[in-house]
Image: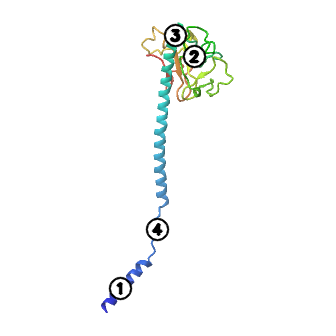
Amino acid sequence: MRTEQASQIVRKMLDKRTSRQVKPAAFTLIELMVVVIILSMLALLVMGSYFNQVERARKAAAKATIAEMEVAITRYQVDTCVYPPSLSAASPDGCGMLELVLIHSTSGNSNIPSSAMWKGPYLTVKQELLGDLNGNNVITGLTAGNVQILDPWNNAYRYVLESNYNLYGTVLPSSHPYATTETYYNPSTFQIVSRGPDGVTLADPNYGTGADDINNFGE
C-alpha cells in the first residue's frame, strides 16, 4: 500500500515537472544594443590599427624610393659628370626629366643612348608607379620627359636641381643653424620631395616642408 502511494506521489511530481513550459532564454533590446556597440568599437580599433600599419608602410616605401633615387642620381653624375635636369619637360614640377635620363637617357632610347658615357638604366621603376602629374597611372600619350615617378599616394615626386633653386628651391627656415650662411637645403646638389599622405604641401619657397611631407633635406 505504501509502495503504491509512493509511486503515485512520484508520478504526480513528474507530471508537474513535465507539464511546466520551459521559457527560452532571450536578450533584451538594451543587451543587444550593448553587444552591437562593443563589436563596433572593436571593429574600429582593428581597422584603425590596420590603416596605421598601411600608412607606415607607405611612408617607409616613399623614403626607400627617395634613397634609391639619390643613389641612381649619384651614379649618373659619376658617369656623365653632370646631374640629371630638373622637373618635367613641359611643367615646372614633378620629376619627368629625372625619369627620362635615368631610365632611357636623354635620347629616350636606352639601347641607343645620347652619350657614350651613359651606362644606365640607373633606376628600375614598376609600371604602376609611373604616371602623369595628376597621379593617373597612364603614360600613353605622354611625351618624353613628362612621365612621372609616383609616390605611394599616386603623386609625382618633385626633383629640383641646384641650378633651379632660385625658382623652385626650398629655403632653410630662419631658425636653422646655417640659415645665416646658406639659403637652401642641399645647397650644392638636389632636392627630392613627396607631398606625403595628404597630397598637399606648402608653396614655394617652402615646398616639401609640410608636416607629413617626405624629402631628402639634410639637416
Q: In front: 158, or 114?
A: 114
Tag of residue 48 = none
What residue does disc 4 label? 24
How far apart are the two marked residues, 2 and 4, measured between alpha carbons? 73 Å
What residue does disc 1 label? 9
Name the image quarter holding the N terminus.
bottom left
Disc number lying in front (1 or 2): 2
- In the image, 34: left or right of 135? left
The x, y position of residue 171, in whole percent, is 51, 14
Dividing the picture into quadrants, the one containing residue 203 is top right
Q: Of the residues shown, which amino acid type is indicated by label 2?
A: Leu
Which sits earlier in the primary sequence, circle 3 or circle 4?
A: 4
How far apart are the two marked residues, 3 and 2, measured between alpha carbons? 12 Å
How far apart are the two marked residues, 3 and 1, measured between alpha carbons? 106 Å
Dividing the picture into quadrants, the one containing residue 218 is top left
Which sits earlier in the primary sequence, circle 4 or circle 1?
A: 1
What residue does disc 3 label? 77
Q: Of the residues shown, which amino acid type is indicated by label 4?
A: Pro
Residue at 47% x, 17% y is 217
Mark 1 and mark 4 in contact (Cβ < 8 Å)?
no
Above or below for 33 versus 202: below
Mark 3 secondary-structure assignment: helix
What residue does disc 2 label? 98
The x, y position of residue 74, in whole percent, is 49, 13
Q: In front: 2, or 45?
A: 2
